Image (cartoon, grey):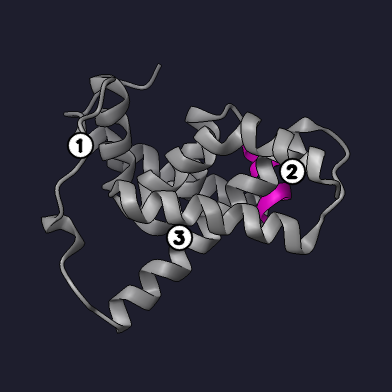
Amino acid sequence: MTEQNIERLFAQYADTVYRVCRAYLGNAADSEDAVQEVFLRLMRKSPSFDNESDERGWLIVTACNYCKSLLRWKKRHPLTDTNALPEQACVDEYRAELLELIMSLPDHCKQVVYMHCCEGYSLADIARLSGIKPSTVRVRWLHARRRLQELLGGMEDE
């Protein structure tokens, strides 16, 4: 993968990767570090992609996997309470509320919800990109929808 390709991918998808990481990690500093790590992994692995959707999907899946690993590591090696650190003000309150709702979901559901609702991937594409069985993705989507309905006060299915 050339330097220009990596720069293009960073310019195009760094914000998306940041939002994924923020949904998992909950704070700006860790999320920024995670974005850097995801793009370092892109440089090391140099995957080849068939299309732009696969590029974005690979970055989202890698971000989700990295964040889950980081959270497991932090749980085993607690250093400080990162929730006590001051947060940057969020300009878009709707986006902040959406990320907060996604963060409240169980870890196994966050990736599916983010990729489907925020990035527009079909459940089949999420399964293909994540290497997860389609039936597992559908079950995770169902669990997440039920949990979100509970959180939002039992809104009707559309």
Are circles 3 and 2 on residues that touch, CB within 8 Å?
Answer: no
- The residue singled out by tag 1 in the image is 151
Three-letter amino acid code at the position of disc 1? Leu
| Image position of 157 (left or right of 9) | left
In the image, what residue occupies the spot 29% across and 43% down?
147
Q: Is residue 125 magenta?
A: yes
The residue positioned 85% from the left and 46% from the top of the image is 2
138 up-or-down from 117: above or below: below
Which x, y percent locates residue 132? 65, 58
Foreground mark, 3 or 1, reads: 3
- Residue 87 in the magenta stretch? The answer is no
When the figure is inspected, residue 44 is found, relative to residue 118, above or below; the finding is: below
Alpha carbon distance from label 1 to label 2: 39 Å
Q: Which residue is mark 3?
A: 67
Q: Gap in Å between the C-alphas at discs 3 and 2? A: 21 Å
- Looking at the image, can residue 122 be seen? no
Q: Specify the amino acid type for callout 3.
A: Cys
Among the two numbered marks 1 and 2 on one chain, the one whose residue lies closer to the N terminus: 2
Element under disc 2: helix
Q: Quadrant of residue 25?
A: bottom left
In magenta, the rendered stretch is: 122-131
**Label number found at residue 6:** 2
- Disc 3 + disc 1, Cβ < 8 Å: no
Q: Position of residue 146 (x, y in %)?
A: 33, 40
